[in-house]
Amino acid sequence: MISRASQLATTLGVTRACEVLGVPRSSFYRARQPKAEPAPRPSPARALTPAERNGVRQLLNSERFVDQAPRQVYATLLDEEIYLCHWRTMYRILESHQEVKERRNQRQHPPTATPELEATAPRQLWSWDTLAPARSAGVTKLKGPAKWQHFYLYVILDVFSRFVVGWLLAEAESAELAETLIATTCRREGIQPDQLGLHSDRGPAMQSKTIAQLLIDLEVAQTFARPYTPNDNAYSEAQFKTFKYRPGFPEQFGSLAEARAWVQAFMQWYNYQHYHSALGLLTPAMVHHDQAQQVQTQRRQVLAAAYLAHPERFVGGQPTVAELPVSVWINRPLEEA
């Protein structure tokens, strides 16, 4: 309001501007006066000198006391008949240097590079993950007939087409089972050397030497998500969410065979009947098996015929078919976004 009064005062004058806006003139003039810098707070005569404060800080950060809290240092010094200051003062000295924290030199893991992976066609980039009991409560477990029994679901997903190219259900998590699944899937999909990248999180099976050696032999590039970064493996996470919220998902399976039959039916639906919103409402199978262009051409013909029959019903003009993305990224670079 004061700023508006200042603008209006240039044409009406201060008195009239304040009357129009209901601003007291005293407040108007007070706001225009520069605020004086606050006077420095005097240091009490009893305060530690800068040299003494520096000595306390050096002692707290010394090799002997760097891993102890100020209270512990305070008590230790008293037992040695030494008094420098109260432990609260020790805290204030540390706080003034932003050192109220772990003061030891900690081993730090080097920063993990952000994976930036692109797929422009099927069979270029796969994402795989395991739906396992060890996951957080937000992720569904495949419960078995006994309270302690759970099943592990391995899923390999084509990032571009969202087609589940391979899956395996087992009673235990095993690098050997994962190796068999990857090898079988690569063979069935006709993967050639240097054609494919396989992306995963940092689970035990994913980082095993067994899997690493298999991918070297197959000449498949291996990449990992950053620790504690679910978005680095978002496509697998999204597929598991669809799995979890599929109508009829049972709270408990009576046997491994029953669970396998349910998963088989889900994967059949997901690949061949699920119209994926990110694929322009095509099914993963249509994209994976190069049927997308044919299906979209047919859809355009249907929409064109509907428009010709009743153009008045289409206020925005002739409807169009949603396009299939040209490329799919895991962490698209900023310059590409």
Image (cartoon, grey):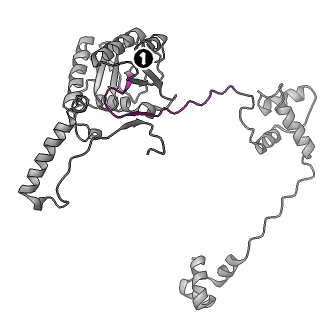
Residue 216, position as x, y percentages in the image: 45, 14
Q: What amino acid does circle 1 point to?
A: Glu
In the image: residue 157, left or right of residue 26? left
**Residue for point 24% across, 24% down:** 267
Dominant secondary structure of the residues highlighted in magenta in the image: loop
| 122 within the magenta span | yes
Q: Nearer the viewer, residue 76 or 314?
A: 314
Quadrant in which residue 187 is drawn? top left
Residue 284 shows in the view: yes
**Residue for point 40% across, 36% down:** 329
- Number of residues whose C-alpha sits closer than 10 Å to that of mark 1, classed few (under 14), some (14–19) or many (20 or more): some
Q: Secondary structure at mark 1?
A: loop
Q: Answer above or below: position of 256 versus 75.
A: above
| 310 within the magenta span | no
Residue 13, position as x, y percentages in the image: 61, 90
Residue 151 shows in the view: no
In the image: residue 230, left or right of residue 15? left
Q: Answer above or below: position of 135 versus 46.
A: above
In the image: residue 40, left or right of residue 188? right
**Residue for point 84% across, 58% down:** 41
Residue at the top extreme? 176
Q: Nearer the viewer, residue 85 or 68?
A: 68
What is the magenta range?
103-129
Quadrant in which residue 289 is drawn? top left
Q: Answer above or below: position of 169 versus 43.
A: above
Residue behind mark 1: 219
Looking at the figure, which quarter contains the N terminus?
bottom right
Looking at the figure, which quarter contains the C terminus?
top left
Q: Nearer the viewer, residue 153 or 188?
A: 188
